[in-house]
Amino acid sequence: MRDKNLNSKLKNNFGAKANDSRIYIFLVIVFVIIAAIYPAFFTSGSIKALVSTSLIYIIVGVGFTYVMIGGNFDLSIGSIINAGAVVTMGEFNRFYKIFGGVEGGDSALIKAWILAFACAIGVGLLIGFVNGFLVAKVKVHSFIVTIGMLTTVAGFVYTYSHGNSISANTYSLVDVIDKSFVKIPYLEVFTPRFVIAIILVVVFEFILLKTKWGYDLFMVGSNKESSFFAGINTVKKVWITFIISGFTAALGGSLFAVSMNAAVPNFGERGIAPLMFVLAATIIGGTAMLGGSGSVVKTAVATIVIQSIFSFLISMGMGFDAQVLAAGVVLGAVVFFESFSVYRQGLKEGERPALVLEAEQLRLKK
Amino acid sequence: MKKSMRTVFAILLCLVMVFAFAACSNGGNSGGSSAPAPAPAPAEEDADIPAASADTEDNLAKSKAIDISGLKGSDGQLLLIYGNARPVPERPADPKSLPDDDPLKYWDIEYAGRTTQKADPIVSPADGIIGKKIIMIGQSEHPYWGAVFNGATIAANAYGIELTTWNPNGDLNQQNQLIDKAIQEKPDMIMLATLDAEASVQQFKKIYDADIPSVAFNMFPSDEAMRYVTAITGPDDFGQFRLLAKTVADKVGGKAGVAYVTHLPGGSPYFARAYGPISTYAQDYPDMKTLDLQSPGFEAPKTKQVVADWITKFGDQLNVIILSDDSAQSEGAAQAVKEAGRDDIIMVAAGNSKIGMDLVKSGGLYAITYQSAEADGAIPIKVAADYFNGEKVENAYYLPQAIITKDNVEQYEPAAW
Amino acid sequence: MSSDNSASVVTLKSNTGKVSFNTIANRFGVFLMIAVLLVVGAFASPRFFSGANWLNILSAVSILGMVAVGVSFVIYCGKYGDMSVPMVMALSGVISVEFMRYGIVPSFLGAVAVGAVIGLINGIVIGKLKVNAIIWTLAMNFILEGLIRWSYHGTQIYPDMATAVTYKTGFLLPLMAKLDPNIMNIDLTMRAENFNALAQTYFAGGIPLMLVVMVIIMIIGYFIQSKSSYGNKLKVVGSNYDVGNMSGIRATTIVMLAFMISSICASFAGVFITSVNKVGAFYVGAGYDFQAVTAIILGGMSLSGGRGNIIGVAGGVIMLGLITNILNLFGVGTFTQKMISGAIFIVVVAVNANSLRKLGKDDA
């Protein structure tokens, strides 16, 4: 009897647990509310629309989460998305022409697309490499480096595209990228772009949770010095997170461009920028601001939740004011809740519940 | 191990929930919508059922009887005003390879859709506009758009249209989602002011594939998209700015140094409002020299700095400034000119906001273009009415081209937004 | 880390004769860059050194300057930045237009009061409850944007215009109209002119009022940050929160005040930018959050807190104005300007961080 009581008291860290899996609780709450008020939200078509809108944020969120787990920020993702987009389209047109255009047939198309994607991802990797170099090696604060990079890359994007949006000269890929594999309702979401996103999320979550590299990254994020003394190459770890972020941002951007068959140089300059969206999703998904914990899957789930809220508000006939207000309230509530649970934990620091309980029982006996 | 198991479990739970809700909502939905759905369907398809056809004819006759040409906007002026379409020159083989100041370089933006043959247009049911459900998707929440939707609502109420307006707030990704949502709602028509001419091909194709007719308003889509669109309506930005450029050139006697403050890069206004005048001058006024072109955005302090820098750099060579926005940009430019004591510089801008009108009155701006926001919203509704009433619909409808100067500013009072 | 520190101090002492590049870069930082820019500027245009050009440069950055002083307090206490700046500016702007009906002074006071209240909320949540500053202020920014858009239904408010809907929409205006129906009949022309004149008031030789206000705010900010006991406490808290807390400083209050200062400065900037634009709307402050951080970091303030001063911030603000000015004078297009100014920023900050590290002054 006593043991059971003690155990339950010792394990009474429900707050911390709830905070840990808050995004799933949140998801359930949001879905229940939406289902109660607006059941038509869950039709096959709107689920597909919801998911395909979220895809770019999910893909970009993978790298962003990695950078944040490593204890840094990557504010340049918005520009890298645009860079990936315009480079994909611009280079495709160039290569397609080189390979002979329409006369080149399918092989010219495939070659041109592969090269275009390679160029776009190359640009993303390069930007990530420079970011990582400045943050990890030169040791400038990531916040600053990536603000500077944000402007620089935006300038590059405009120069590259001459301020114009670029579209590919063929509709070869656009018809494929968002076409469902199966025509069964609710399985329609399985488009090539969705599958790519899922693979990215699963692979990178696997690396985080199952490999030594992932464990080490968590350690670097939570305490750089002790992980250095534990023999982890902290510079390399942080550097690689930025390269991953450059990769996912460029890939997200180029897939987004392909899905519209057009690359826009100023995507995200108005509205809630992808940066703010991904940042909010990552935080709501439970990644620690200062590094050391986080999950790619949770970021993806948080993206879906936020997008569901937006979509629901639109369905209810509310404007952008309600959406942005909801985003603020949710984000505020989440950080508030997080700090509150940390604060409660702080109060318990140094407390020895087993002893207290024993003392209490002694007192009761008397 | 445990952590990943929990994650997998949570995802499975989510999926199950989605399906569960989906099942409920499907049941509820079919039950709810089954009542009204069959009513219009036979009316459209089986014209030989006498009652239904009488209904249709009745509706059509009633619809045709509605005349909104005398309808007034919230500013007390005529809501429906059209401009004339300009003649279309022949498209050059590869417009993009032409030099920047060649007017034909911008053919794809300027004359998009005017000559396109529609492959297989969606045929109008021709059963009258009354009671039709239309979804209108705008661009952003700029006050201009409030006025656009206002104009559309006034016209829609006159026709008895069930109009829904949505706003993606300038975000292309959100606009795509709104289009998907709109298609889900199965309206009779979708009106879209696309955020990007190139991306609009995909957007309009999606609507076309869902067998819903569409109207492109405010912003002209690229040529390719026109195959899927019933009609385009909106301001003729290039025409307006070529006209504005000519007004200015005539004012200064065809000889001046001109600097341009552009619209945000990446859209057709960027080209229309800077390269429109540039190419007009290159062709007709060789002595109008382009000095510089900058994009400080819609921000007064930044525009002020750019203009002041120009005054420092070019001195007396700078005679004319062409601005893309008559609010913040013009206000900043006017203050810079005033501080430098260069009242001789002639400034012109796009749009007719209250600030722009005030500046024209006070002499800060020489001229602005006239663009009625409410007409921008009302004309697509009129096009929809023509379409559903079975009348002929043109490829393109333009807002009127007009220049507001100090002499005629009173006519355009009060400003729409 | 401490061993690192002492080692480098020793090497510095032994090299006192030689002045290394790192020392110069560290001590003069942004002013070195300004000197370089002055030389470059001389080539850009013969009129570069004219008074008119300098007035232009300074007045162009005066709104940014006001914001930067406020945000520098937040950065100085180690909290990275205040993302709610844009909407505090916008809100102060619309409030000042709404309160303009009672005169210029109430309009200013109203705007600053609203800014102070938001700063207080930010401060309590961040200072007392230790919520992450960036995320909370970002959330605050979203909430305020939602509120302004919702209360104005996407319209904007002109100082000199009152239509039928003016007193039905708005942040406090409907309430004001209910409490005191007389304000609906006030003649706005004069008052609007006074309000719009704020941005166009000039002192001797054409020095704009905005510039004067910026300089005053900077001077006051300098004294508070570097000469007052509050500033000292702020520095301790900024360098090490826990040490500050344990040495008897009420760290939570210190942080709270820093956020209030930031919001109040943003309110001033908001009133002026609204007066420049002659319209109050939700979009007026966009971009000033990151720009302020850029200027502050260029000015040598460290994001980890406790290092730098307002003189450096002033230098950073002027440098941003100078870069744009010189590039405009050279006729560099906007796109290339973005690339160049971004690259300059990264290089300057990297050199600065590197020199700090070489001198052993940073534990990064």
Image (cartoon, rainbow, N blue to C red):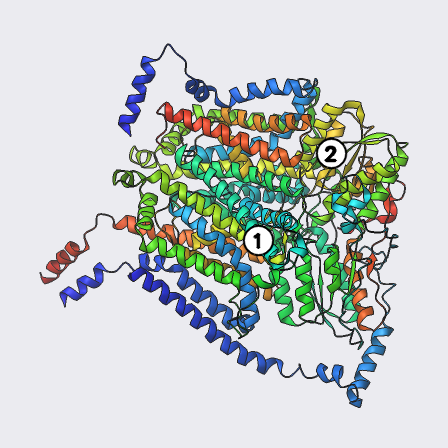
Q: Which residue is mark 2?
A: B333
Pinpoint residue C344: horizontal percent, then vertical percent.
54, 29
- Residue C141 — which label? none
Q: Which residue is mark 1?
A: A111
Choose top left, top right, bottom left or bottom right for residue B124.
Answer: bottom right
Q: Chain of mark 2?
A: B
Quadrant in the rendering for residue C12: top left
| Furthest-top residue in this view | C17
Q: In this rendering, does residue A312 appear at all?
A: no
Q: Amino acid at mark 1?
A: Lys
Evaluate whether residue B101 shows in this view: yes
Q: Chain of mark 1?
A: A
The image quadrant that residue B194 belongs to is bottom right
Instruction: Establish if C223 lies above or below A206.
Output: above
Query: Is residue A70 toward the left or the right of residue B212 in the image?
Result: left
Residue C98: give x, y in percent of width and height.
Answer: 65, 45
- In space, the residues marked 2 and 1 are separated at their CA atoms by 50 Å
- For numbered disc 2, what is the local secondary structure? helix
Inspect the image, locate mark 2, and give the three-letter code of the amino acid beneath it: Ala
